[in-house]
Image (spheres, helix red, strand yellow):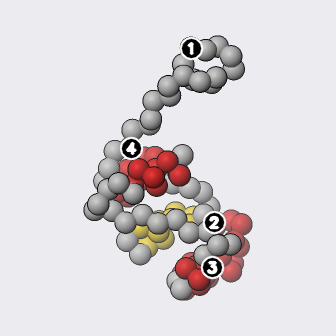
């Protein structure tokens, strides 16, 4: 869900949305004293960390669709499933 939301945000010119992984982008994490301190205390409990306008707004879980809407002012609409084994009326799941 979070990947789809970020993919959708890439098409919005007025919003800058980036995702970073501690393993792949440690420099991004170390540049922020507040994030570094949170990770140092208990990385497993605080990751993932969501930052909006420079402020930590959520830790320990990805934001929900409602939270993303609150943060961005956008309304996220789930993509419709178009059949397949577990979608539509296939009855195979």
Query: Between marks 3 and 4, how big is the CA–CA gap?
Result: 30 Å
Residue that appears at 61% across and 14% down: 90
Badge nearest the viewer, 1 or 2: 1
Q: Which residue is mark 4?
A: 76
Quick check: 54 above or below 12?
below
Q: Residues within 10 Å of mark 4 (few under 14, many from 20)?
A: some
Q: Decide: few, some or many residues near mark 1? Use Cα within 10 Å; few <14, some 14-19, many ≥20.
A: few
Quick one: label 3 or label 4, which is nearer the N terminus?
Answer: 3
Q: Nearer the viewer, residue 39 or 26?
A: 26
Name the residue that disc number 1 marks. 89
Q: Residues within 10 Å of mark 2 (few under 14, many from 20)?
A: some
Calculate the distance from the C-alpha at mark 4 to the C-alpha at mark 2: 23 Å
Drawn side of residue 53 relative to residue 38, left or right: left
Q: Which mark is residue 47?
A: 2
Residue 55, horizontal then vertical, whole percent: 43, 73
Residue 26: which numbered mark, if any?
Answer: 3
Q: Residue 69 at x, y = what percent?
A: 37, 50
Quadrant for residue 53, please give it: bottom left
Residue drawn where x is 58% and y is 79% of the image: 29
Label whose residue precedes the other's in the sequence (3 or 1): 3
Secondary element type, mark 2: loop
Mark 4 or mark 2, earlier in chain: 2
Q: Distance from label 2 to label 3 (Cα)? A: 13 Å
| Residue at 45 percent of width and 52 percent of height | 7
C-alpha separation, residue under disc 3 versus residue under disc 1:
45 Å
Q: CA distance from mark 1 to mark 4?
A: 25 Å
Residue 75 versus residue 5: which sits nearer the camera?
5
Give the x, y percent position of residue 57.
47, 65
* CB contact under 8 Å: marks 1 and 2: no
């Amino acid at each position: 869900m979070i990947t789809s939301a970020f993919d959708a945000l890439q098409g919005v010119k007025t919003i800058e949305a980036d995702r970073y992984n501690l393993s792949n982008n440690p420099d991004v994490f170390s540049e922020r004293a507040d994030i570094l301190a949170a990770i140092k205390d208990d990385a497993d409990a605080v990751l993932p960390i969501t930052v909006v306008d420079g402020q930590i707004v959520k830790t320990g879980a990805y934001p929900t669709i409602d939270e993303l809407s609150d943060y961005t002012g956008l309304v996220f609409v789930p993509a419709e499933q178009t059949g397949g084994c577990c979608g539509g009326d296939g009855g195979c799941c």
